[in-house]
Amino acid sequence: MTRRGSYAKGVAKREEILATALEVIARNGYGRASVRELADAVGLSQAGLLHYFSSKEELFAEILRKRDEVDQAAFAEAASGEHLTALDGFIRIIRHNAEVPGLVQLYARLSAEATEPDHGAHEFFRERSLAFRELAAGTVREAQQAGELPQDLDPEHVSTMLLALADGLQTQWLMDPTIDMAAHIADFLALLTRRGR
C-alpha cells in the first residue's frame, strides 16, 4: 500500500511541476526559465526536480506535451458549444499561442534541437508531427467529402504544409510579433477553398 501511495504522490508532484512550469515559461519565457527557477517554483532542488524526469530535455518535452493537453481540452470545451472543425480549433490554438510567447519560444527552440535522433525530445516531436498530420489529413478528407475543399488536393500534402506553415510562422512571429499567425493560417485555408471555384 505504501508503494501505491508513493506512486500516486509522485504522479501528483510531476503534474504539479508541469502545470507550474507552463505558467512560469508562459510568463517569463523559455530563455529565462532555468531548471533552478522551475525547481524553486515547486519547492524542490534541481536534483529533486530532475528526479521526476530522465533529463532536462524530457522535462521540457513533457511541458510541451502538457501544453498540448491543456490546449486540446480548451478546444474540446469550446467545440461542445459550437460547431468547430479540427482546422477551426487549430486556428484558435495558433491565435492563443500569441498570448504565451514563452511557450512558443520553447517549442521553436526545442523542436530545432530535437531534430538530432539522440535528443531527449526527438521522439516527442516525431510522434507529435505524425499525430498532427494524421488529424489534419483526416479533416481535409472530411472537408473534401462535404464539398468544402477541392477533390484533387492531397490531404497528406496539405497537412504537412499546414504544420510547416505553423512552425515557420511561429519562428517569424518570435522575430516580429506584429505578424498575425492565425490570420495567415486562415488565409492559407481560404486559398485552398477558392482553388476549387
Image (spheres, rainbow, N blue to C red):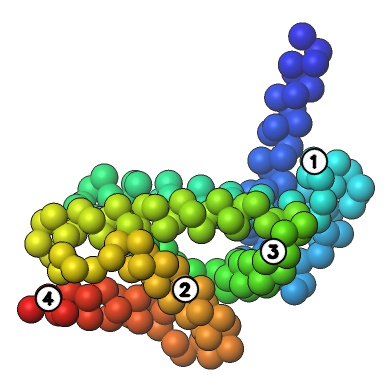
The CA distance from mark 1 to mark 4 is 51 Å
Q: Earlier in the sequence, mark 3 or mark 1?
A: 1
Residue at position x 35%, y 58% in the image: 136
Task: Tell me how far mark 1 sits from mark 2, CA to CA.
Answer: 32 Å
Please rate how many residues cluster around mark 1, counting C-alpha atoms within 10 Å: few if below 14, some from 14 to 19, many from 20.
some
| Residue 28 image position (x, y, % from top left) | 69, 71
Q: Mark 2 and mark 3: span between their CA atoms?
A: 16 Å
Q: Alpha-carbon distance for marks 3 and 1?
A: 20 Å
Dot placed on the residue nearer the N-terminal end, 4 or 3 = 3
Question: What element does badge 3 sit on?
Answer: loop
Mark 2 residue type = Ala
* Residue indicated by mark 4: 196
Q: Which residue is denoted by mark 2 in the rendering?
A: 164
**In terms of secondary structure, where does tag 2 sit?**
helix
Identity of the residue furthest to the top in this view: 1
Q: Where 153 sits versus 49, above or below?
A: below
* Quadrant in the picture for the C terminus: bottom left
